[in-house]
Image: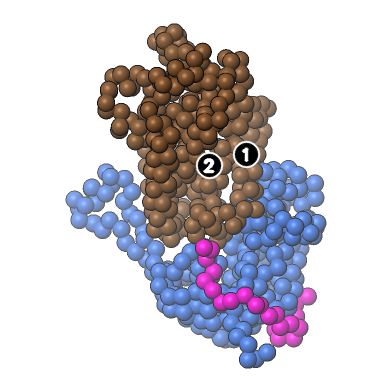
Chain colours: A brown, B blue
Amino acid sequence: MSTPAEATTTKRRVDAPLSPPWSQQGLLEVFSHRYILTLLVRREIAARYQSSVLGLVWSYVNPMSQFFIYYFVMGILFGRAQRTEAFAVHVFTGLIIVHFFTETMNAGTRSIVRNKALVQKMAVPREMFPVASMLVSLFHVVPQLMILLLATWIAGWHPDPYGIVIGVIGLLISMTLGTALALMFSAANVFLRDVSNAVNVLTNFVRFGVPMMYPYTLVAQRFGGHTTIYLLNPISEAVLDFQRAFWVGATSNPAHTAAMDMPPGLLWLSLRALLISLVVLAFAQSTFTRLERRIPERLL
Amino acid sequence: MKRQDDRSIVVRHVSKTFTLRYHRTIKQMSVAMLRQQELSNSFLAVNDVSFTVRQGESIGLMGLNGSGKSTLLKMINGIMRPDSGKVLTRGRIAGLIATGAGFHPQLTGRDNVYLNAAILGMTEAETRRKFDSIVEFADIGRFLDSPVGHYSSGMFARLGFAVAIHVDADIFLADEVLAVGDRPFKKKCLAKMQEIRSSGTTLFYVSHAPGSVRKMCDRLLVLEKGTLGFDGPVDEGIKYLRYDDDDDSDDPELNEESMDEELGADI
């Protein structure tokens, strides 16, 4: 089979320019590799439920169980359910955003380390992995939204266009900030595995630092006039936006609820939160770019 | 033709340093600091290496373990960036830098073929077109639709090799490709690599077996502790390496007969 060295070799002309072999990095570059991104996302989703009997049902079970725990402890035990109208919807709208955000952050943080086999063998933008984690989490938002829609419909939901717009902004905020933190922590986690533990701690803060288990009114009452810091957290706005979209319409007097339980100027607050998230994203990208060069050699 | 720039790979004064960490936890680090030991130290894996490869050349890369072969290959492949110096390549690169890149143990062979092909830069249409040929080459039979986690290491490697070899690349990197796989498969791989070579693809072949390098390559680079010790004709290079004494053990298979055992699971 072996041919002598020079004999049959045909000349091959390659028109491509002589250029550095590594891939262009950056978030935008990820979307020019859309095909790999889809495959990665599909792989994650398929692999998560491989050889489990219930499969996709688990992505309903997990948030549902959390919902029942919060509802029971905060609603029944602490008596919030009597004081807050449609408390179940209130918790669940918050839970969707919080769950999506923390999932993105947690899975994103581990994404590069977990995919080290790929990272060490292919020259693609490495932003791909945290972004894929975000998309996988986003995929799991869909069934939860279905449950939410059903619940709000039962509670007598009156959807309004402003609510829908602001709900979309809320989702955008959590997507942007989730991606930003996933990006930053995924690279940092390669160098120090402490990061994934720190992210777990951060997750707990997120759960209690947003108006999910308690209404925003409570914060406004207790820390009257000092809600600025509370609202600087973009996830607070994201949760409030989602509640404005779903929960407010499900209460008996939406106009009253919106005036009472939502901070004034929610739209501007949300746009500011989106802006903050974008700034964090820009910072995360620059951090990632700085760390990214040394990622392959630091992955064990 | 001579007038045209036919450089395929240009490596110019490339160096790469790795940091070795000794002390990972705060406790270990503070103890080390008290004892005034070094907290980290660095290691020059590739040291000022320069060479140019023309399109269609077939290069063997040899050197002892730890001489920087894989690091150099990873830089040519674009996975790692050099600390200093320049790496330039022309066209699509495919390679076998440890086969089975990114195979997900829980997914079936079929899904993994698509994923792996995408990683190597193939489009969906291209993969579909070559799918049958890939499967035929891998020869894994009805295991195609079971999770690759259940594959024997030989089957795993074969599937990875089959995908990589079907990429229509301008530069093909092969790093210790034939470490796994039984004798018939190794033969098949070498034949396929000859085919790739004769199609005008630049071939970069890392091996410890002088026999297969001699068959496959028309130029040899020898790395010694990160520096380029030799660049020239294959036979001279093998003499330089003093690898020629075990010349008779042609292919790597002799010392790897044990690997064939593992393929017992193969149908």
In percent of width and height, residue B223 lies at 49, 76
Could you tell me which chain the residue with mark 2 belongs to?
A
Magenta stretch in the rendered image: A1-24
Residue B63 on image: x %, y %: 52, 73
Relative height, residue A125 to residue A90 (above, below): below
Subunit bearing disc 1: A
Q: Residue at x 46, y 79 (%)?
A: B12
Q: Earlier in the sequence, mark 2 or mark 1?
A: 1
Residue A78 to residue A267: above or below: above
Mark 2 residue crowding within 10 angstroms, few (<14) / some (14–19) / many (20+): many
* The furthest residue to the bottom: B3
Q: Residue at x 39, y 46 (%)?
A: A280
Q: Are marks 2 and 1 on the same chain?
A: yes
Question: Is residue A180 placed above or below B82 in the rendered structure?
Answer: above
Q: Which residue corresponds to mark 1?
A: A45
Q: Is residue B93 above or below residue A241?
A: below
In magenta stretch: residue B234 = no
Total number of numbered discs in the rendering? 2
Nearest to the observer: residue B59 or residue A155: A155
Q: Residue at x 30, y 28 (%)?
A: A227
Q: Secondary structure at mark 2?
A: helix
- Amino acid residing under circle 2: Met
In screen coordinates, is A158 left or right of B226? right
> Going by the image, does A5 lie left or right of A202?
right
Q: Quadrant of residue A59?
A: top right
Q: Secondary structure at mark 1?
A: helix
Q: Is residue A8 magenta?
A: yes
**Residue A253 appears in view:** yes
Main secondary structure along the magenta-highlighted residues: loop
Res B27 quadrant in image: top left
Is residue A84 rendered to the left or right of residue B89? left
The numbered mark at residue A134 is 2
